[in-house]
Image: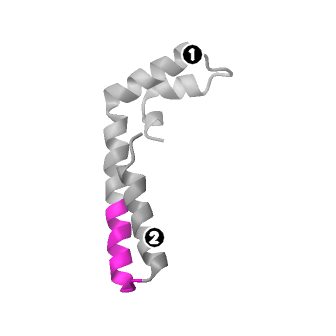
Amino acid sequence: IYALQDPEVRTIYTQDTIDERDVSRIMTILEQKGAKAFAERMARQYSERAEYHLRQAGTDSPAHQAIGELVHLLVARDA
């Protein structure tokens, strides 16, 4: 959805077919727009919210701990 804010990307996505050159152009636009940094920021924000709500739940069960670890792993992993 972030990419579709760009008119050129929207045009490419509405084509009947997309070739390697189109994909390359979209990747360039996404890099220029800082899409990766945006996605990483959003992931951090949502993970912080998830961790907050887990703490508010006030339980320390194995399932609770596993969810917390999963949240951390998903955000910390290399893309």
Residue 64 among those drawn in magenta: no
Is 43 in front, or is 66?
Answer: 66
Residue 48 among those drawn in magenta: yes
Is 19 in front, or is 64?
Answer: 64
Picture colour scheme: one colour
Looking at the image, is 49 positioned above or below residue 77?
Answer: below
Q: What stretch is highlighted in magenta?
A: 47-60
Badge 1 amino acid: Glu
Q: Which residue is label 2 attached to?
A: 66
Q: Residue furthest bottom?
A: 58
Q: Distance between the residues labelled 1 and 2?
A: 40 Å
Mark 2 or mark 1, which is nearer the start of the sequence?
1
Q: Which residue is label 1 attached to?
A: 20
Looking at the image, is 60 positioned above or below residue 68?
Answer: below
**Residue 49, percent across and down?**
34, 67
Q: Do the residues labelled 1 and 2 touch (CB within 8 Å)?
A: no
The secondary element bearing badge 1 is classed as helix
Report the residue at 42% width, 39% height from top.
79
Q: Residue furthest right?
A: 16
Q: Residue furthest front?
A: 62
Quarter where residue 51 is shown: bottom left
Report the residue at 48% width, 18% height from top.
24
**Residue 67, percent across and down?**
45, 69
Badge 2 amino acid: Ala
